[in-house]
Amino acid sequence: MSWKLIHRNGESFEAAFSLLNKNDITQLRKREGWSRGIDWSDYLRNDQDFTAYRLHIMGDDQTQGLIALAVRAGFVELGFVEKAPSNKTADKAFMNAGELLFAHACLSSLESNGDGYVLLQAKSKLKDYYIDHYGMEVVSLRRNLLAIPPVESRRLIELYWNQRS
């Protein structure tokens, strides 16, 4: 089974999530547009609750997005989510890279008996986007905590999870 990553020309590619490793981190150059405020190697430490994954096209080493998540009792918590620089611009290479990152967290929640709940602390400027685009619900306004509810989790998974592969 695989994810469907949709190129801007409409072509669909089989994609997968792999554990992030030290070799992958060498690709994440800040001068090429990866976030300056995050050190993904922090998620490789043994004392870390979160596990980092990278989104890539099957058979291709290029990272299309990254996600750090932790399985909790009844939900998945997101530590950080980032699309590749080529997927952040108006003429992004893959139209649904962000959706796949969140859908992976949703599937992880369902697979760990979390009913699909995914919790994240949103950056203030992205909160409204997450609510509108992903159907997230506000858990705490003061702390900018949002959650993807089970209905939205299942919708994301059904849109992009290719069960025929």
Image: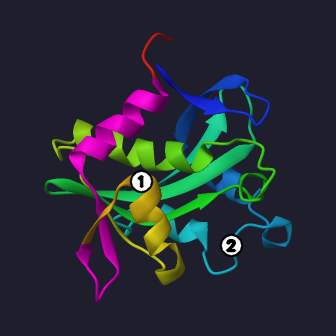
User: At label 2, which amino acid type do we have?
Assistant: Ser
Residue 111, given in percent of the width and then of the height, sits at 25, 36
Q: Secondary structure at mark 1?
A: helix
Mark 1 or mark 2, which is nearer to you? 1
Can the viewer see residue 45? no
User: At label 1, which amino acid type do we have?
Assistant: Tyr
Q: Is mark 1 in CB contact (under 8 Å) with mark 2?
A: no
Query: What residue would you read off at disc 2?
Result: 35
Q: How is the image coloured?
A: rainbow
In the orientation shown, which residue stands out farthest toward the top? 164
Find out whether residue 146 is within the magenta segment: yes
The Cα–Cα distance between marks 1 and 2, rounded to whole angstroms, is 22 Å
Can the viewer see residue 58? yes
Q: Nearer the viewer, residue 12 or 53?
A: 12
Query: What residue would you read off at disc 1?
Result: 134
| Quadrant housing residue 119 | bottom left
Q: Which mark is residue 42?
A: none
Residue 126, given in percent of the width and then of the height, sits at 51, 73
Residue 53, given in percent of the width and then of the height, sits at 52, 49
| Label 2 crowd (10 A; few <14 / some 14-19 / many >=20) | some
Find out whether residue 12 is within the magenta segment: no
**Going by the image, does 10 lie left or right of 75?**
right
Residue found at x 24% / y 39%? 110
Q: Secondary structure at mark 2?
A: loop
User: Which residues make up the magenta segment?
Assistant: 139-161
- The correct choice, above or below, for 96 with respect to 33 in the image is above
